[in-house]
């Protein structure tokens, strides 16, 4: 706790439309409850 860089964000507005680090498919965005969620369609089946 309290240490910067403890984890890396993989799914966010900064990584939107970039390749997934696991499979290479692009990161998608979907509207959800007034905000956005970011996910890989290939790795995270909805």
Image (cartoon, grey):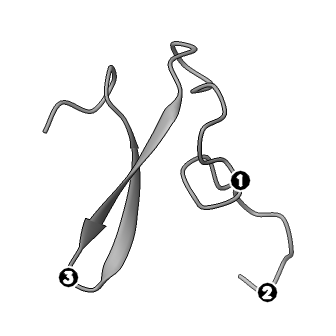
For this view, does 27 lie left or right of residue 43? right
> Please, what secondary structure does the residue beneath circle 2 have?
loop
Marker disc for residue 2: 2
Q: Residue furthest left?
A: 46
Q: Is residue 37 above or below residue 25?
A: below
Mark 1 packing: few (<14 Cα in 10 Å), some, or many (20+)?
A: few
**Residue ID at (75%, 63%):** 6
Quarter of the rendering occupied by the C terminus: top left
Q: Residue furthest right?
A: 4
- Using the image as rendered, state which of residue 24 and residue 28 is in the foreground: 28
**Residue ID at (51%, 37%):** 27
Whether residues under marks 3 and 2 lie with C-beta atoms below 8 angstroms apart, the answer is: no
Residue 40: x, y in percent?
40, 33
Q: Disc 1 marks which residue?
A: 8
Corner quadrant of residue 9: bottom right
Residue 12: x, y in percent?
58, 59
Mark nearest the camera among 1 and 2 is: 1
For this view, does 4 lie left or right of residue 22? right
Chain-order first, disc 1 or disc 2: 2
Mark 2 packing: few (<14 Cα in 10 Å), some, or many (20+)?
A: few
Q: Disc 3 marks which residue?
A: 33
């Amino acid at each position: 706790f309290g240490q910067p860089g403890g984890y890396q964000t993989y799914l966010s507005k900064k990584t939107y439309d970039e390749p997934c680090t696991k499979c290479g498919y692009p990161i998608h965005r979907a509207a959800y409850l007034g905000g956005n969620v970011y996910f890989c369609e290939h790795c995270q089946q909805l």
